[in-house]
């Protein structure tokens, strides 16, 4: 009798653990996804509409409509909320991951710039799944956005299929910082370009002209140790303050092209990793 009870309760506990585990794992995945989406990855810096003050419009997370205009294109960030009609609610997880890492929609068409697809190719499988979980948890908003127009041809693909991408261990601080710099596409903006193609020999060297806010253009900064006044020579505390507030150590407010409102939730260890990586960039004089 007693033994039977024990067996039953153990069985019951086993089932309870088995049932609880996937829920727990799913919570962790969503937590990671939200951390990335609302922090370093900051899809919303392009996909969330902003008001005249440059701040994200409340209740419109990822609803699209932001126009990014340069001489060779007029790109409109689409609605990527889970709305089934006007957003990406009807796409499968795999289709969403392909759109992010390979720049290909379910209908086979290519997503144009400035979405930093080439940087997103590095996004690990588990982080990609976490991002999808977070995207699905966003409030669906019905908002049909206009189509982008490009005066340049879009590539047939951004590269071969991505396949599997392993996680980078945070234990290796510099490599992990490099990974964060990819998924945060820091060097997309901070590397000079020649007609839209990044000049990889000048990685992180700055000097790229980017749309400013609310209008005009702004030149990105040289993040390499070759800039004597630059971030590679700042203290970790100075770097964190700048990334979270948009105010440089000398007190100058940076143009809000960067996603400071998202970056403020990046944790200390990730910011330390980013800085450790930036300090290893090849010094470039600019
Ligand atoms: C620098 C700005 C920028 C960033 C950052 C960005 N996107 Fe985009 N995204 C765009 C633009 C612009 C388009 C439309 C391009 C076009 O019309 O071909 C687009 C298109 C898309 C599409 C295709 C949607 C459709 O209905 O056609 C998806 C999905 C998408 N982005 C998801 C994301 C996700 C997820 C992230 C973050 C991981 C992200 N984007 C980051 C600018 C950006
Ligand atoms: C959408 C483009 C864009 C992205 C993405 C971006 N930056 Fe920037 N960043 C800029 C621009 C433009 C400036 C210069 C703004 C100004 O001078 O007012 C800047 C300035 C900075 C500065 C100040 C440097 C100085 O010497 O004044 C730092 C530090 C920095 N970025 C680091 C980063 C890091 C780290 C990332 C990735 C997490 C990142 N940026 C992503 C566009 C970008």
Image: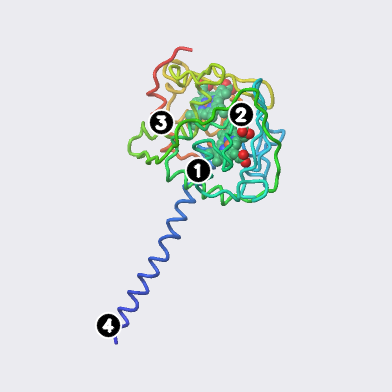
- Alpha-carbon neighbours of circle 1 within 10 Å: few (<14), some, or many (≥20)? many
Which residue sits at x=62%, y=46%? 81
Q: Nearer the viewer, mark 2 or mark 3?
A: 3
Q: Which mark is residue 13?
A: none
Please report whichever mark, 3 or 1, sits nearer to the chain's N-terminal start.
1
- Alpha-carbon neighbours of circle 3 within 10 Å: few (<14), some, or many (≥20)? many
Residue behind mark 1: 97
State which quarter of the image contains the N terminus. bottom left
Element under disc 4 = helix
- Residue 18 falls in which quadrant of the image? bottom left
Please report whichever mark, 2 or 3, sits nearer to the chain's N-terminal start.
3
* Cα–Cα gap, marks 3 and 1: 21 Å
* Cα–Cα gap, marks 4 and 1: 50 Å
51 and 47: which is toward the camera:
47
Q: Are marks 2 and 3 in contact (CB under 8 Å)?
A: no
Residue behind mark 2: 256
Tell me: is circle 4 under 8 Å from ligand 1.
no
Tell me: is circle 2 under 8 Å from ligand 2.
no
Element under disc 2 = loop
257 and 121: which is toward the camera:
121
Residue 46 coordinates in the image, percent (x, y): 61, 35
Residue behind mark 4: 3
Please report whichever mark, 2 or 4, sits nearer to the chain's N-terminal start.
4
């Amino acid at each position: 009798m007693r033994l039977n009870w024990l067996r039953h309760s153990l069985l019951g506990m086993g089932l309870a653990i088995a049932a609880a585990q996937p829920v727990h794992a799913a919570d962790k995945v969503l937590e990671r996804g939200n951390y990335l989406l609302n922090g370093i990855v900051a899809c919303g810096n392009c996909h969330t509409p902003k008001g005249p003050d440059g701040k994200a419009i409340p209740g419109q997370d990822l609803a699209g409509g932001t126009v990014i205009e340069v001489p060779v294109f007029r790109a409109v960030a689409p609605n990527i909320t889970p709305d089934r009609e006007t957003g990406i609610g009807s796409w499968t997880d795999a289709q969403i991951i392909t759109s992010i890492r390979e720049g290909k929609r379910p209908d086979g068409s290519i997503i144009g710039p400035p979405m930093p697809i080439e940087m997103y190719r590095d996004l690990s499988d588990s982080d990609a799944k976490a991002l999808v979980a977070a995207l699905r948890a966003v409030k669906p908003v019905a908002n049909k956005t206009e189509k982008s127009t490009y005066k340049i041809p879009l590539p047939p693909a951004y590269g071969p299929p991505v396949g599997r991408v392993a996680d980078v261990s945070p234990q290796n601080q510099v490599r992990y910082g490099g990974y964060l710099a990819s998924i945060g596409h820091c060097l997309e903006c901070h590397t000079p370009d020649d007609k839209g193609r990044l000049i990889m020999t000048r990685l992180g060297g700055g000097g790229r002209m980017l749309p400013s806010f609310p209008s005009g253009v702004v030149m990105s900064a040289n993040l390499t140790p070759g800039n004597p006044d630059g971030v590679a020579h700042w203290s970790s505390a100075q770097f964190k303050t700048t990334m979270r507030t948009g105010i440089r150590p000398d007190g100058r407010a940076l143009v809000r092209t960067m996603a400071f409102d998202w970056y403020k939730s990046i944790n200390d260890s990730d910011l330390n990793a980013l800085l450790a990586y930036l300090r290893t960039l090849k010094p470039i004089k600019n």
